[in-house]
């Protein structure tokens, strides 16, 4: 699995923005990726020093479409903590 396959997309939400102030960045990741692979991918792709990585398996929500029950997709989310003074420029808009 290459580094580009590990990270799917960044999570841009209010909660993720609050975590960014604490130097933590949130990503949707490949469900089969380990914490070590996620740390390496962030380190190589964004050229930053990663201190910690927390992963969460998010279950899909039950939704209704035209009266029929269904589910949204489940996914794996990773919260990556960077070393003090480090930041990812893509999130800062630079």
Image: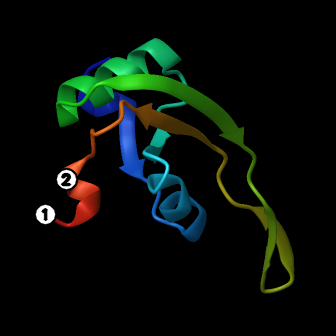
Question: Which residue appears farthest toward the left when viewing the image?
Answer: 94
Q: Residue at x 39, y 22 (%)?
A: 39
Residue 49: give x, y in percent of width and height.
29, 25
Category of crowding for the residue at label 1, using alpha-carbon neighbours closer than 10 angstroms: few (below 14), some (14–19), many (at least 20): few
For the residues bearing labels 2 and 1, Cβ distance under 8 angstroms: yes
Q: On the image, which quarter does residue 8 sit in?
A: top left
Residue 34 falls left or right of residue 42: right
Q: Identify the residue under disc 1.
A: 94
Q: Residue at x 20, y 36 (%)?
A: 46
Query: Which SS class for mark 2?
Result: helix
Can residue 34 be seen in the rendering of this structure? no
* 25 or 30, nearer to the observer: 25
Question: Which residue appears farthest toward the bottom when viewing the image?
Answer: 66
Q: Identify the residue under disc 2.
A: 89
Residue 82: give x, y in percent of width and height.
38, 33
Residue 83: give x, y in percent of width and height.
36, 30
Q: Is residue 10 above or below residue 3?
A: below
Residue 44 falls left or right of residue 76: left
Q: Residue at x 86, y 83 (%)?
A: 67
Can residue 15 be seen in the rendering of this structure? yes
Check the picture and name the quadrant holding the C terminus. Answer: bottom left
* 21 or 58, nearer to the observer: 21
* 81 or 55, nearer to the observer: 81
Q: Residue at x 61, y 31 (%)?
A: 55
Query: Which SS class for mark 1?
Result: loop
Q: Which mark is residue 80?
A: none
């Amino acid at each position: 699995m290459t580094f580009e396959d590990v990270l799917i997309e960044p999570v841009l939400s209010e909660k993720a923005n609050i975590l960014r102030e604490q130097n933590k960045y949130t990503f949707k990741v490949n469900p089969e990726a380990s914490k070590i692979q996620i740390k390496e991918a962030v380190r190589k792709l964004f050229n930053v020093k990663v201190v910690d990585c927390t992963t969460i398996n998010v279950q899909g929500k039950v939704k209704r479409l035209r009266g029929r029950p269904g589910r949204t997709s489940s996914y794996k989310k990773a919260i990556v903590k960077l070393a003090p003074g480090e930041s990812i420029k893509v999130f800062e808009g630079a």
